[in-house]
Amino acid sequence: MMKALLKAEFLVVLLLTFALNACSSSDSAPTPSASPTPTPDPRITLSTFQAASVVIGQTDFTQAQVNQGGTPDSNTINGVYGNSWLNQATLFISDLNGNRILGFNSVPTSNNAHADFVVGQPNFTTGGGGVQANTTSNTGSVQAYKGKFFVSDLGNHRILIFNSIPTTSQPSADIAVGQVDLTAHATGICSAASLQDPYDFSTGGGKLIVSDSANGRVLIWNTIPTTSGVAADVVLGQADFTHCNTSVTASSTTINGPLGIWSDGTKLFVADSNNKRVLIWNKIPTVNQTAADLVLGQPDMISKTASTTNKGLAEPEFIISNGVQLFVSDARNNRILIWSQIPTSSYTAADLVLGQSDFTHSAANDDNQDGAADASPSARTFSFPAGMYVDPKRLVVSDSTNNRVLIFNGQ
C-alpha cells in the first residue's frame, strides 16, 4: 500500500515538473523580430525627351535672356553653371556670372520663383565679384555635407567651406581650400595646396575631391580641411604635385580639363572633359597618378573623339548619381545621358536621354528635332546643360546658356 502511494506521488511530481518546464520554455522563447525598415529606393523614373515641369530664372519655358533682359534680381540668372544642391527643404543653385548662389527655402513648384536669400552678394541686385570671406567670383557647384556648406568659387581659385548651412544673405565662409586665407587670390601656382579653376568637387565618404581644371589634375584630401591652405594628399592626372601639364596624351593615368566630380566614398567618377570621356576608379585612389579602371564615352583609354551616340560624348561637364543611376551632362551635344545602372564595364551605352528625342540628335533648343536650333527654347530642350541634382522626386538641370534651371519631376 505504502509503495503504491509513493509511486503515485512520484508520478504527480514528475508531471508537475514537466509542466513547469514546458511553461518556462514557452515564456522564454524569443519573440519574432520586427521586419527591418526597407531602404528607400533612390531611383527616379524619367523618360527620353521628357518636358520639364518648372523653370527658374525665366518667366516661362520659351525665354532665355540674361537676367530676364534687365539687372540681377531674386528671380534672375546669368549663366548658371555647376551642380545644384537640396539640403533638407532648401534648394541652392549657382548663378555663375552673377557671382552668387541663390537660396530657395523650398523647391519651387511654379515658374519664375524668387529666391529667399543669396550667398556671395549683399543683396539680390548687386552682381560684381569679390575676394573676401563673404564674396564670390564665378560660382560653380555647391554641396552640403554633415552641417557644412561648400561652394566652388572658381573665379577666386578656391573652394569655400562654411561651417554652417547658410539661411540668410551674404554669410561669411570659414575656410578657403586652394588659397592661404580668405582674401588671397593667387593664380598660376602648381602645388599640393593650390587650385586653378576648380569647377566641381565631391565630399563623398568624408573626403574632399576637387577637379583642378586648369592644372589638368584632380586633388584628393583624405579628410575635410578645417583650416585654409591645407595641402592635398593625393593627385590624379599628374605624377606629383609640382607638375601641372595640360598637354598630355590620353591614357588611363592622364586627365585634360577635368570638370565634374562624383564619389560615394568608394567609387570615383571624373568628367575628363577635353578628352571627351568619363573616367571611373572602382576605389578612390590613395597613390598619385593611379590609373582609372573604366572609361565611358570612348572605346578605349587612348581615344578622345567626340561623337553623338548612346555610347559617345562630345563634352561631358558634370556628373551625379543616386548610387544606382548615373547622370552625365554632355554639354556640346546639348543633352543629359542617363544610365539605369552604374556601369561596370567600359564604353557602356546610356539608356535614356534628355534634351533630345534620340541619341543621334545634338542641336541646342531643337524641339522639333530638325537638326537646327529653334528661335527659342522649350520645356524639353537644352543649350549647354552644365550641372545637375537628383533625388527620387526630381532632376534639377543647370541649362547654362539658356540662363535657367529646369526641374524635371519623376514620373
Image (spheres, helix red, strand yellow):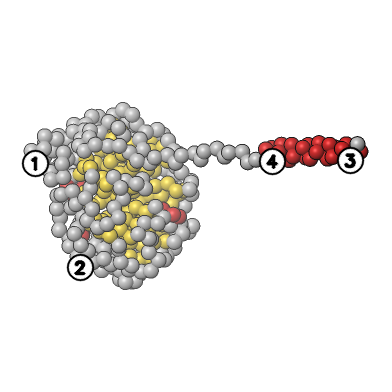
Q: Is residue 123 visible?
A: no
Q: Amino acid at mark 3?
A: Lys
Residue picked out by circle 4: 25
Q: Secondary structure at mark 3?
A: helix
Whether residues under marks 1 and 3 lie with C-beta atoms below 8 angstroms apart, the answer is no
- Which sits earlier in the primary sequence, circle 1 or circle 2? 2
Relative to 45, 12 lies left or right: right
Position of residue 53 measured from the top left corner of the image (x, y, whole percent): 27, 31
- Which sits earlier in the primary sequence, circle 4 or circle 1? 4
Q: CA distance from mark 1 to mark 2?
A: 33 Å
Residue 75, by quadrant, is: top left
Q: Residue at x 18, y 59 (%)?
A: 299
Q: CA distance from mark 1 to mark 3?
A: 109 Å
Whether residues under marks 4 and 1 lie with C-beta atoms below 8 angstroms apart, the answer is no
> Which part of the image, by quadrant, shows the N terminus?
top right
Residue picked out by circle 2: 249
Q: Is residue 277 visible?
A: yes
Residue picked out by circle 3: 3
Position of residue 103 measured from the top left corner of the image (x, y, whole percent): 38, 38
Q: From the viewer's perspective, is the residue at label 1 or at label 3 nearer? A: 3
Badge 4: how crowded within 10 Å, few (<14), some, or many (20+)? Answer: few
- Which sits earlier in the primary sequence, circle 3 or circle 2? 3
Q: Secondary structure at mark 2?
A: loop
Furthest-top residue in this view: 110
Badge 3: how crowded within 10 Å, few (<14), some, or many (20+)? Answer: few
- Vertical position of residue 46 compared to residue 147: above or below: above
- Which sits earlier in the primary sequence, circle 4 or circle 3? 3
Q: Secondary structure at mark 4?
A: helix
- Vertical position of residue 87 compared to residue 224: above or below: above
- Which sits earlier in the primary sequence, circle 1 or circle 3? 3
